[in-house]
Amino acid sequence: MKVAKRILFTGIISVFLPAFSLWATNGTEMAAYGARYAGMGGANLALGGSLMDLQSNPAHLAGLDETSLEIGAGFLTPYLKYKDTFLDQDQDLAYTNEKTSENSMFPVPYMGFTTGLTRDIGFGLALYGQGGIGANFKGITRPLNDPGQSPITLNQKMGQTLPFIGHRKNITENTFSELSIGQLTPGMAIRFGDFKIGLGIDAIFSQLEFRYTFSDPTNSLELPGAGYRYKGDDAYALSGKIGMAYDITDWVTVAYAYQAKSRMHYNGQMSVNAGDLRYLYPARVSMYLEFPEKHSGGLAFKLDTWTISFEIDYIKWSNSFRTVDFNLDQPYVSTPFGNNIDNLSFGVYWEDQRVYAVGLEYKPDSIAWRIGYNYGNSSTTGQGVNPIFPAITEQHVMLGFGIISESMEIDFAIEYAFNNTEKGSMTNDWTILHTVFGLSDIRTLNYSHETSMKQVTPHLGLKFKI
């Protein structure tokens, strides 16, 4: 049974989680799930009528009078930038970088079915991309210098003569990360008059990987004796959600949902200082991330051809994303003070997030027109800004339409996330890493850095009614 479970989830991961560099915009979650709901700004908690109710509020499974099959995807196109500056009287030490993450378009799919078992009891099953985060910055220029010294050439550092590039006094820093999350959610709901309550069980599967490496100035050859490469084992966890909806009148519905927190163990291995025989064998690593609980409330008004919906989400990131700790079974991690330890830690210090969404739908006939707006304060703080876990967008505007018949529905939406920039503080880990050259050589005032992000996401969904 254990082997069968692993084969099943590994197969799901291979289809749903292929090397996504960045997924989400509200923390590690998407602003909207499903093409219809994306057209309404993700304000769907009190609406109902989509497979993706299994992601947000399974109460809407109750009272279904048909069986529906649904498939779709969001196609994320993120634009991430990283900037930093180091000021120094020695112009060989001073530098400025502005790099764009090497991303393209990434599909985030969903599929499944819903059905009415009786007049008041419904069931559904959904498989979908839940979220994630990451980036890929290459060629960040750094001076090649020992603490407190002016930059030296590659030939001096390597102790040999290198053709073409040996005279150069700089190297390049490269960062890569991807955290990808998918879920399989069966759910069931029951209706008691005007009140509906539903439960969903989330089988979560995830992957985590990051690299922090250094290359020659042309970024074609990785330099030995520096950097980290981590790849986690496939991670699994169980969680769940409960949702409720109450029809106050025939045209007003109020809803509430609670998502429980979960813990994912990303135990894996880390290679350190490639080419250094002292670190020949990768270290085994234990680490975990806790994904937070979420409270959501919604309100929907349905008036003839018009529907307007509101939603507020409260996501408790501060209880979960404080530090990311990789605990090694070997003391492989070098510190700026010259000693080695067995822990590599990133301070992310995310804040709790409040997400506000509003959506409007006009459906005079078989065509539905939609518009929505979604705002969630960035969970990232100045203490946690770095190019490995970059900035998050805040404001999203969405437009959509649907073509509806008795047997099927086609929905399309386009989402635009406005550019948002987060600046690193003088005491965050990334600042210290690049400004502490020794106990008596600390230059945090010389350095500044920031990450920024905007995103375009088309959504497409097909619903077949049986």
Image: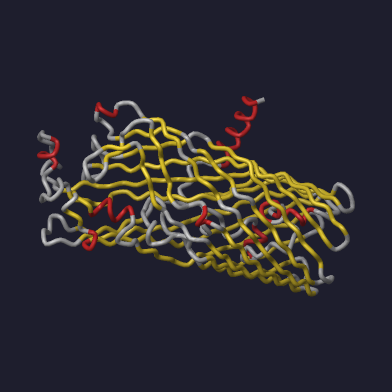
Residue 437 in sight here: yes
The percent coordinates of residue 458 (x first, y second) are 56, 58
Q: How is the image coloured?
A: secondary structure
Residue 102 in sight here: no
Q: Nearer the viewer, residue 199 or 160?
A: 199
Q: Nearer the viewer, residue 329 or 307?
A: 329
Q: Nearer the viewer, residue 466 or 13?
A: 13
Residue shown at 69%/45% (left/top)?
201
Quadrant of the drawing holding the N terminus: top right
Task: Tell whether 113 sits left or right of 316.
Answer: right
Question: What is the quadrant of residue 301 in the picture?
Answer: bottom right
Residue shown at 83%/71% (left/top)?
249
So how many labels did they put on this image? Answer: 0
The percent coordinates of residue 9 (x first, y second) are 61, 34
Task: Tell whether 265 sits left or right of 390.
Answer: right
The percent coordinates of residue 160 (x first, y second) are 10, 33
Please say if 342 is above or below 354: above
The percent coordinates of residue 324 (x first, y second) are 43, 46
Residue shown at 52%/38% (left/top)?
265
Question: What is the quadrant of residue 315 in the picture?
Answer: bottom right
Please say if 128 is above or below 363: above
Task: Tell whether 141 sits left or right of 40.
Answer: left
Task: Tell whether 1 sits left or right of 175.
Answer: right
